[in-house]
Image: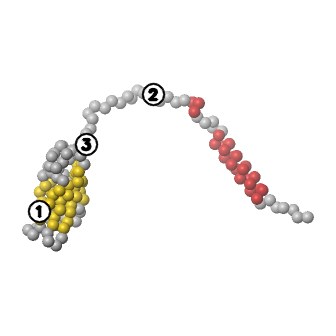
């Protein structure tokens, strides 16, 4: 298991904890390879996979192993965000509203009254007392 892990040319999302196996790294600038400093036991070996970065999202896997056990740590590396320096916004565009598309203010009450009368009619037919002669 790793005792300590630091990356000199980038920053981990959270402080290193040997029990946490997933970390996120967002790069500040374009780099080709993570400079990883680690500390392991004398009997352990380490393998670092996929450490060559090409400007895309990558997952670097650090595996610490010995004869008895193995532990892998996953570093999700995100490239730096590209932000445009110049943005063009047209603040003077007016919103055009077509008044013909609005509904009449009487439509909603009319629908409510119609539904009430329809329910009342069905209620009367279903529960009407029949006369027996």
Dot placed on the residue nearer the N-terminal end, 2 or 3: 3
Element type at mark 3:
loop
Visible residue check, residue 13: no
- Considering depth in this image, is 93 or 55 the residue closer to the camera? 55
| Image location (x, y in percent) of residue 112 | 66, 46
| Crowd class of label 3 (few under 14; some 14 to 19; many from 20; radius 10 Å) | few
**Residue at x-position 82% and y-position 61%:** 129
Q: Quarter holding the C terminus?
A: bottom right
Dot placed on the residue nearer the N-terminal end, 2 or 1: 1
- Considering depth in this image, is 25 or 107 the residue closer to the camera? 25
For mark 1, what is the residue?
39
Q: Which is closer to the viewer, label 2 or label 1?
A: 1
- 121 above or below 70? above
Residue 42, picture quadrant: bottom left
| Image location (x, y in percent) of residue 123 | 74, 56
**Residue at x-position 20% and y-position 58%:** 61
**Residue at x-position 31% and y-position 32%:** 87
Element type at mark 2:
loop
- Considering depth in this image, is 124 or 109 the residue closer to the camera? 124
| Crowd class of label 2 (few under 14; some 14 to 19; many from 20; radius 10 Å) | few
Residue 40, picture quadrant: bottom left
Disc number placed over residue 94 in the picture, else none: 2
Disc number placed over residue 81 in the picture, else none: 3
**Residue at x-position 11% and y-position 62%:** 39
For the residues labelled 2 and 3, the Cα–Cα distance comes to: 33 Å
Element type at mark 1:
strand
């Amino acid at each position: 298991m790793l005792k300590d892990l630091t990356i000199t040319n980038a920053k981990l999302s959270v402080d290193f904890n040997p029990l946490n196996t997933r970390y996120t790294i967002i790069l500040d600038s374009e780099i080709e390879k993570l400079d990883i400093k680690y500390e392991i036991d004398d009997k352990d070996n380490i393998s670092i996979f996929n450490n060559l970065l090409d400007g895309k999202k990558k997952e670097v896997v650090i595996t610490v192993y010995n004869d008895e056990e193995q532990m892998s740590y996953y570093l999700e590396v995100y490239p730096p965000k590209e932000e445009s320096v110049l943005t063009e916004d047209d603040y003077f565009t007016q919103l055009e509203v077509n008044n013909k598309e609005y509904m009449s203010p009487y439509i909603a009450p009319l629908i409510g009254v119609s539904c009430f009368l329809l329910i009342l009619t069905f209620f009367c037919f279903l529960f009407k007392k029949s006369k027996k002669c």
